[in-house]
Image: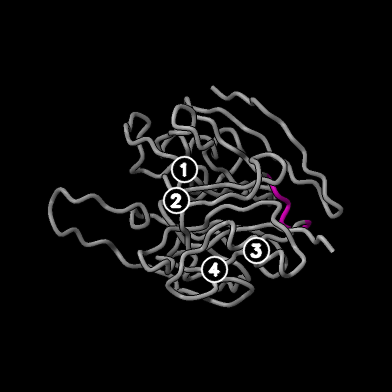
Amino acid sequence: MLTRTTLFGLLLATAPLHSETIEHGGATFWVHRVDPKAVKIELHLPEKAGEPNTFPKLSARLEAQGRRLVFAMNSGIFEGNFRPTGLHIAEGRTMTALNLDDFVKRSEGELTPNFFLKPNGVFFLRADSSAAVLESSRYAKSGESPVLATQSGPLLVEGGRIHPALGPDSTSKRYRNGVGVTKDGQVVFVCSVLERDKGMSNLYRFAELFRDHLACPDALYLDGDISYIHLRGLTGPVEETNWFAGILAITESVR
């Protein structure tokens, strides 16, 4: 059952940004829809290698440039040294390479980390501002040369099909965040409401939300319990967050 509990419009000088909370499968999510041809989506990595990225740190850097955050959400999964596990491209520059490795279990009962739960995938923006989500090996063969990209896993939905390893009865419930692309090219960012009694979901229901209710035939999981979202005017001031590698952001000028 889908329930829309809150509806907002953020109107900027350039274009509207549409935000709302949606309930699905017993959990509540922030949903932020963006026309990538009207609003610039950016990917910001830490200023120094090995240091964490946070929303306040990013906000301070932007303010020094005469900009402020309108939207922020953490990007794909990363390692303990705050280096992304997979492909990250910002402003056309490849920060970390595409990762097609398979996870090798050291024991029979070891769980496969989410990033390596194949198929995984890449969310990316082309120079013409069009957006897509592609399975990682397909991306490698595609010849795409994007200006922005983040790789993560699992690939929640591919061509309208939910990842085969995900099940509706899974008891693994966490905060979730992810990104999907609609048939008409809109980018849909989703993040759990950060309240334990409202925001916890399994991966199947999260994928189902993208496919069945957000019209995204392709969607990518970004990360889990550490996830945060900032929507100016809706989620409160920019506050201290968990530590990240990449942060996806939309800004506006304050000068």
Secondary element under disc 3, as helix, strand or loop, is helix
Give the distance between the C-alpha atoms of the residues marked 1 and 3, in whole angstroms: 26 Å
CB-based contact (under 8 Å), mark 1 and mark 4:
no
Secondary element under disc 4, as helix, strand or loop, is loop
Give the distance between the C-alpha atoms of the residues marked 1 and 4, in whole angstroms: 20 Å
Q: Where's residue 45, x and y in %?
A: 54, 68
User: Which quarter of the image is occupied by the C terminus?
Assistant: bottom right
Secondary element under disc 2, as helix, strand or loop, is strand
Query: Is the residue 197 above or below the residue 177 in the image?
Result: above
Residue identifier under label 1: 176
User: Given this view, does label 2 or label 4 mark the residue nearer the observer?
Assistant: 4
Of label 1 and label 3, which has the lower sequence position?
3
Q: Image point 55% across, 56% down: which residue?
A: 133
CB-based contact (under 8 Å), mark 1 and mark 2:
yes
Q: Image point 58% across, 56% down: which residue?
A: 55
Of label 1 and label 4, which has the lower sequence position?
4
| Magenta-highlighted residues | 33-38
User: Given this view, does label 2 or label 3 mark the residue nearer the observer?
Assistant: 3
State the colouring used for the structure image. Answer: one colour
Magenta portion: prevailing SS class: loop
Q: Image point 52% across, 38% down: which residue?
A: 192
Count neighbours of disc 4 (C-alpha within 10 A) and say few if under 14, some if 14 to 19, many if 20 or more. Answer: many
